[in-house]
Amino acid sequence: MTGTGGAGAAMTQALCGAGRVLCRLEEIEDGEGKGFTLGQGLEARDIFVVREGGRVFGYVNACPHRGTPLDWQNDRFISDATGLIMCATHGALFEIEDGACVAGPCAGQCLEPVALSVDGAGRVLRVEG
């Protein structure tokens, strides 16, 4: 697994009893996101994690409208103007908590969720299964 989050995130990625460690919570600025690639080759899947305080929300990095990546620069998923997840291709806006599109050509559709948790040590885990 590699991450768009850089070498620091790559060093912390490991298997843990409850899932795969993606990074430490503190590596994601509150109100921002961080991208990761799970798997390799044809099995690779880009995801991103958004932090709100001590909570994290994960989604597949693909707009439901066109399937294009949401980030317009590495780890840039949140609109400064609205505080919502924004698609780089056409500006669709998505709620952080549930991935629901609230504006744009895919209004009423949702981002594909990725199950995550934060453990007692402050590590963000991709929950397997």
Image (cartoon, rainbow, N blue to C red):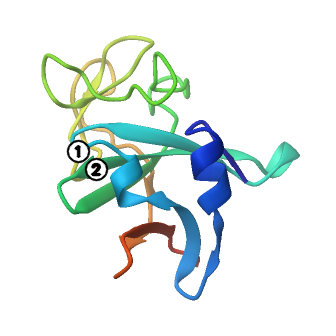
Q: Residue 30 carries which label?
A: 1
Q: Residue 105 carries which label?
A: none
- Report the residue at 46% width, 16% height from top: 72
Q: Which amino acid does label 2 sit on?
A: Arg
In the current view of this chain or complex, which residue is farthest to the left? 82
Say which of 100 and 51 sits in front.
51
Query: How many dots with numbers?
Result: 2
Verify CB contact (< 8 Å) between mark 1 and mark 2.
yes
Between circles 1 and 2, the one closer to the viewer is: 1
Viewport quadrant of the C terminus: bottom right
Residue 33: percent from left, percent from top: 37, 39
Q: Give the structural element (helix, strand or loop) at label 2.
A: strand
Residue 37: percent from left, percent from top: 65, 45
- Relative height, residue 96 to residue 13 (above, below): above
57 vs 108, left or right, is right
Circle 2 residue: 51
81 vs 61, left or right, is left
Name which of mark 1 and mark 2 comes first in the sequence.
1
Snapshot quadrant of residue 26: bottom left
- Relative height, residue 95 to residue 52 (above, below): above
- Report the residue at 55% width, 23% height from top: 68
Q: What residue type is labelled 1?
A: Asp
Snapshot quadrant of residue 24: bottom left
Residue 114: percent from left, percent from top: 46, 59
